Image: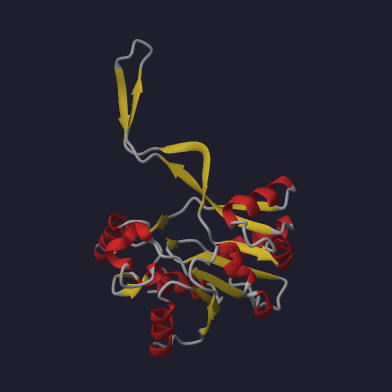
């Protein structure tokens, strides 16, 4: 069910992306392509598929390339506004710079490098229900390594390849904030995930939407290749719009 709810979607697209330097030396990380389209386009399609297509892209590093891309392409029903937020600006301050552009009580924020088969309206439903200042998407934590399980006598019981670590979660982005968040973004030295979220947590003002589906962050060149492989095999779970 698509909610009829007018909301802005802020995309954080101003960082350097140094761990993907093979690509980001010439372009901002959100413009790195997966399947012939910038990853930011995939993220925006995820929102638009659920009926949220009013975007504000918060640019910084090599932001002119993002401006040029959205000048050249036109997606039906998308409204795209580009906001220059400066190079080296923290994510918290990028969001704060968009305050005057947001008139609704709630708005979405997304990183510019994570793809998921998430339905944003479910994040919104959780956010409205919990009444918190912020709602983040919590993703199960999986081990980066295979795990060896042992019997009591230390003989090997079995091997588990990169298992899920029970009751441990990571921040997958895909946020929903109320306008109250701007009260917490006034200190220019504070970063979103560190000081701001920790303060919100101490006040009981940040909730979580649990997403057990697909999620992957494109941090490295290997991550990009993994996403390309999924697309080439027609196994890309985030592609819901075909």
Whole-percent x and y of residue 83?
54, 79
In percent of width and height, residue 104 lies at 71, 76
On the image, the x and y values in percent for residue 34 come to 31, 68
Q: How is the image coloured?
A: secondary structure
Q: Judge from the rendering whether residue 237 lies leftward or rightward of residue 198; answer left or right.
A: left
Quadrant position of the C terminus in the picture: bottom left
Foreground of the two, 235 or 67 = 67
Height in image: 233 above or below 76?
A: above
Residue 158 in view, yes or no: yes
Q: Is residue 147 left or right of residue 208?
A: left
Name which quarter of the figure residue 27 lies in. bottom left
Picture quarter containing residue 51?
bottom right
Residue beneath the point at 73% across and 48% down: 204
Q: Is residue 140 left or right of residue 225?
A: right
Residue 235 appears in the figure: no
Give the image location of residue 165, x and y in percent: 46, 37
Which of these two is toward me, 154 or 173? 173
Q: How many marks?
A: 0
Report which quarter residue 222 is drawn in: bottom left
At 72% from the left edge and 55% from the top edge, which residue is drawn? Answer: 130
Residue at (35, 56) in percent of width and height:
19
Seen as rendered, the residue at the extreme top is: 153
- Residue at image point 58% right, 61% down: 175
Of the 4 image quadrants, the one containing the N terminus is bottom right
Q: Is residue 136 above or below residue 3?
A: above
Query: Does 177 sit above or below residue 78?
Result: above
């Amino acid at each position: 069910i698509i909610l009829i709810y007018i909301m802005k979607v802020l995309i954080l697209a101003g960082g350097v992306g140094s761990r993907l330097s093979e690509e980001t030396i010439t372009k901002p990380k959100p413009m790195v392509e997966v399947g012939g389209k910038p990853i930011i386009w995939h993220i925006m399609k995820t929102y638009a598929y659920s009926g949220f297509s009013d975007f504000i892209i918060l640019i910084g590093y090599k932001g002119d390339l993002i401006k040029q891309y959205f000048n050249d392409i036109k997606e039906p029903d998308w409204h795209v506004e580009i906001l220059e937020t400066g190079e080296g600006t923290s994510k918290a301050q990028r969001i704060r710079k968009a305050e005057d552009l947001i008139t609704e009580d709630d708005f979405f924020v997304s990183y510019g490098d994570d793809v998921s088969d998430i339905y944003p309206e479910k994040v919104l439903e959780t956010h409205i229900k919990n009444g918190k200042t912020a709602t983040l998407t919590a993703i199960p934590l999986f081990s980066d390594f295979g795990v060896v399980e042992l019997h009591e006598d230390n003989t090997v019981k079995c091997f588990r390849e990169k298992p899920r670590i029970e009751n441990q979660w990571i921040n997958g982005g895909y946020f929903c904030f109320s306008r109250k968040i701007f009260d917490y973004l006034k200190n220019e030295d504070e970063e979103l995930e560190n000081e701001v979220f920790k303060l919100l947590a101490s006040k009981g003002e940040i909730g979580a939407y649990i997403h057990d589906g697909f999620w992957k962050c494109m941090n490295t060149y290997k991550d990009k290749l993994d996403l390309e492989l999924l697309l080439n095999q027609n196994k890309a779970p985030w592609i819901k719009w075909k």
